[in-house]
């Protein structure tokens, strides 16, 4: 089967679709600008965004480019065994985030007037040093994760325009900077909500039409079997048990996928930061409105869409591996062009480009905020808030250029694997220090610093060993996540917790102190 032919119709339609999406985001940025005049409002808005928009936004940031396109590159490359990483466990990651983090973070943020996750660490542990550790580690890993988002955006733009990588990547960076600099958190949250809705529709339609194109499940499996029967195996013992292949070749790798998604969703800063500006959840229906869009966007559509990589392998064979630097990550956009022509390609490119922008924008804003608020602001507390606001906006530009040059000159072969390694670090370090720290009153700054120190060092060392095929990625995930949690628990138990009076000021009274539900937050 030959690859789809890129005609002017694809380019024109894709530009039109993206233009509509970007105009909407730009308008949201202008509308939000009036609510981003102060530093607090720029960083977290007015703390009034409802659960439905928040659910759409967190779905968009959770899925991002690696789930909506990179995962199809995984199933395209290794077949059915890639589904453990590409689709089966995705919903198991996002649901715990809702129940563990949503209420706690929104109430904590309102109670303590926090702007960033570094602020949460500073106040929760009563420690500038813990805040700096969290902010610095967060920024370092986010640069790696942002590379995956930019490669996804660049791959999509290449598929429908054929432009050189530099222009494909630069376009994504410029778009994000425009509405981030203008509107801040509120613009980002509303833009993400809109992008999440668009993303869910695009992924569902592509999954259905791709399966239909290859003759349904039976037709797809027949074509895969004819090429390589190993593509039908749910675990691939024929693959090496080192490097990223371990995720598909043995039980350590398969089970590590569950650990990865469970920890990373609740630990990824750009996910849980969506709750900082959400209004406190006081009604039972708030949970319903929060979780409905999560299931609708990050649930079935993504699991269905993960089969698109299998459909692409059945359609194109291994031909995509020869297209550099994009390789198997072209599976989904090319399948959209093949199965649905211009209309489907336009819908999919627009939806996934929106997802990559939503995640990338959330990350860039957090990194710039970490530097301005949690590092400079922590240690130079007399800097005026408006100066921090100006600094935060200026920092967005160099912060966005780092992943731009990284992606341009040293792109990952499969973006989902690079982002997966960074996600393990996120889960190991920030699931305990940010989320569990709001539940476990015994936690201390020593535990938080030990957790972040181990998690960052382990992520760097084990990712290097995985890249050199000296260690399986499954083992790396287990060692990073469990080791970080152990350091957090042991470090906290061996040190002195904050006084109960101080904890009551920060977290509110312990559960036993009030039997009528959470303390209301004014």
Image: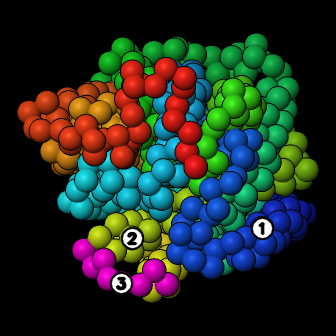
Under tag 3, what secondary structure?
loop
Label 1, label 2: how many angstroms apart (C-alpha)? Answer: 25 Å
The colour scheme used here is: rainbow
Residue for point 57% across, 32% down: 98
Name the mark on residue 28: 1
User: Is residue 179 placed above or below 151 in the rendered structure?
Assistant: below
Of the residues under marks 1 and 2, which one precedes in the sequence? Answer: 1
Mark 2 in CB contact with mark 3 (< 8 angstroms) = no
**In the rendered structure, does residue 337 fall within the stretch colored magenta?**
no
The residue beneath circle 2 is 373
Where residue 185 appears, as percent x and y from the top left, is 61, 64
Name the mark on residue 383: 3
Quarter of the image holding residue 437?
top left
Quarter of the image holding residue 20?
bottom right
Decide which of 56, 71 is in the foreground and name it. 56
Residue for point 44% across, 68% down: 369
Label 3, label 1: how many angstroms apart (C-alpha)? Answer: 30 Å
Decide which of 194, 76 is in the foreground and name it. 194
State the extent of the magenta-drawn residues as a range: 379-386
Instruction: Classify residue 9 as left or right of residue 402.
Output: right
């Amino acid at each position: 089967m030959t690859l789809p032919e890129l005609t002017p119709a694809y380019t024109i339609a894709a530009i039109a679709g993206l233009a509509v999406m970007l105009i909407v985001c730009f308008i949201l940025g202008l509308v939000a600008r009036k609510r981003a005049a102060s530093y607090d409002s720029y960083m977290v808005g007015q703390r009034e965004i409802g659960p439905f928009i928040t659910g759409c936004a967190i779905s968009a940031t959770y899925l991002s480019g690696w789930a909506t396109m990179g995962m199809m590159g995984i199933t395209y490359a290794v077949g059915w065994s890639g589904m453990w990483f590409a689709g089966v466990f995705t919903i198991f990651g996002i649901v715990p985030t809702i129940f563990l983090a949503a209420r706690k973070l929104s109430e904590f943020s309102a109670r303590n007037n926090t702007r960033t996750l570094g602020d949460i660490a500073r106040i929760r542990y009563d420690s500038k040093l813990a805040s700096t550790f969290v902010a610095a580690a967060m920024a370092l890993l986010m640069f790696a994760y942002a590379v995956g988002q930019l490669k996804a955006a660049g791959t999509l733009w290449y598929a429908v325009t054929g432009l050189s990588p530099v222009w494909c990547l630069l376009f994504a960076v410029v778009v994000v900077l425009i509405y981030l600099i203008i509107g801040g958190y509120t613009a980002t949250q509303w833009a993400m909500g809109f992008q999440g809705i668009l993303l869910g529709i695009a992924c569902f339609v592509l999954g259905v039409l791709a399966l239909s194109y290859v003759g349904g499940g039976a037709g797809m499996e027949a074509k895969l079997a004819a090429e390589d029967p190993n593509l039908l195996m749910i675990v691939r013992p024929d693959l090496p048990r080192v490097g990223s292949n371990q995720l598909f070749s043995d039980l350590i790798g398969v089970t590590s996928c569950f650990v990865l998604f469970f920890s990373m969703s609740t630990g990824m800063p750009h996910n849980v930061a969506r709750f900082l500006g959400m209004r406190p959840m006081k009604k039972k229906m708030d949970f319903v409105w929060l979780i409905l869009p999560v299931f609708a966007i990050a649930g079935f559509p993504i699991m269905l869409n993960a089969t698109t990589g299998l459909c692409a392998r059945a359609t194109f064979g291994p031909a995509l591996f020869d297209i550099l630097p994009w390789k198997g990550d072209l599976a989904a956009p090319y399948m959209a062009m093949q199965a649905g022509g211009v209309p489907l390609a336009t819908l999919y490119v627009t939806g996934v480009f929106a997802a990559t922008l939503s995640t990338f924008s959330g990350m860039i804003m957090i990194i710039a905020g970490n530097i301005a608020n949690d590092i400079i602001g922590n240690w130079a507390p007399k800097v005026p808030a408006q100066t921090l606001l100006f600094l935060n906006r200026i920092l967005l530009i160099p912060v966005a250029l780092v992943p731009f040059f990284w992606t341009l000159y040293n792109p990952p072969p499969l973006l989902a694997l690079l982002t997966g390694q960074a996600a393990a670090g996120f889960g190991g370090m920030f699931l305990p220090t940010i989320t569990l720290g709001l539940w476990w009153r015994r936690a201390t700054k020593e535990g938080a610093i030990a957790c972040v120190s181990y998690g960052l060092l382990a992520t760097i060392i084990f990712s290097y060993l995985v890249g050199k095929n000296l260690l399986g990625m499954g083992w790396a995930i287990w060692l990073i996540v469990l080791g970080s949690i152990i350091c957090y628990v042991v470090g906290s138990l061996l040190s002195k917790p904050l006084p109960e009076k101080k904890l009551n000021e920060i977290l509110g009274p312990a559960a036993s102190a009030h039997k009528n539900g959470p303390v209301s937050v004014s």
